[in-house]
Amino acid sequence: QVQPVESGGGLVQPGGSLRLSCAASGTIFANYAWAWYRQTPGKQRELVAAITTAYRTLYVGSVKGRFTISRDDAKNTLSLQMNSLQPEDTAVYYCNQGRYINGNYYSSDTWGQGTQVTVSS
């Protein structure tokens, strides 16, 4: 059973940067697409970015041009570089193992504990 562990969150001022990491065990990391999601209280978890096994990337909405998703298959690690952070980026961020089919990312039901990102002055 895959066990993702997210880290790297924290408090940052608007315009600042953070780098999130996800270490995954219990899976053949390279065989799957991976994604970052985020969730705020009272809202559904939303897709932020995804990366395929071929390193093709997908970004959703306002994070385009500010966030960069990457993967290191040798280290079973997923990363999210977040620049120009804004208060609306405040959320708990989760990584997820899934499938990328015909331009769409399909998540699995396994989630880690997430990492809190707070953007505030």
Image (cartoon, grey):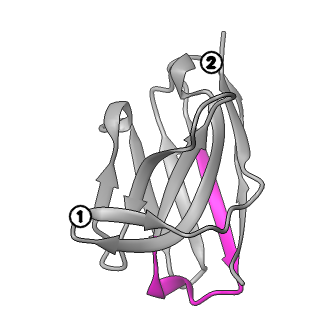
| Residue 50 on the magenta segment | no
Label 2: how many Cα within 10 Å (few below 14, some 14–19, many 20+): some
Q: Residue at x 72, y 50 (%)?
A: 114
Tell which tag, 1 or 2, sits nearer the viewer: 1
Q: Secondary structure at mark 1?
A: loop
Q: Residue at x 55, y 70 (%)?
A: 108
Q: Quadrant of the C terminus?
A: top right
CA–CA distance in space, label 1 to label 2? 34 Å
Give coordinates of residue 22: x percent, y percent: 64, 63
| Residue 27 on the magenta segment | yes
Going from the N terminus, do you reach mark 1 or mark 2 first? 2
- Residue that mark 2 sits on: 13
Give coordinates of residue 81: x percent, y percent: 49, 47
Task: Judge from the rendering whether residue 52 lies leftward or rightward of residue 42; answer left or right.
Answer: left
Q: What amino acid is found at the position of numbered circle 1 in the picture? A: Gly
Q: Secondary structure at mark 2?
A: loop
Q: Quadrant of the N terminus?
A: bottom right
User: Which of these two is toward me, 73 or 34?
Assistant: 34
Task: Judge from the rendering whether residue 80 lies leftward or rightward of residue 1; answer left or right.
Answer: left
Q: Residue furthest left?
A: 102
Give coordinates of residue 68: x percent, y percent: 40, 49
Give coordinates of residue 57: x percent, y percent: 31, 60
- Residue that mark 1 sits on: 103
Asked whether the beta carbons under mark 1 and mark 2 sit within 8 Å of each other, the answer is no
Task: Judge from the rendering whether residue 117 lies leftward or rightward of residue 64; answer left or right.
Answer: right
Q: Residue furthest right?
A: 113
Badge count:
2
Q: Quadrant of residue 6?
A: bottom right
Residue 35: numbered disc = none
The span shown in magenta is 19-33
Q: What amino acid is found at the position of numbered circle 2 in the picture? A: Gln
Q: Establish if 12 lies above or below 63.
A: above
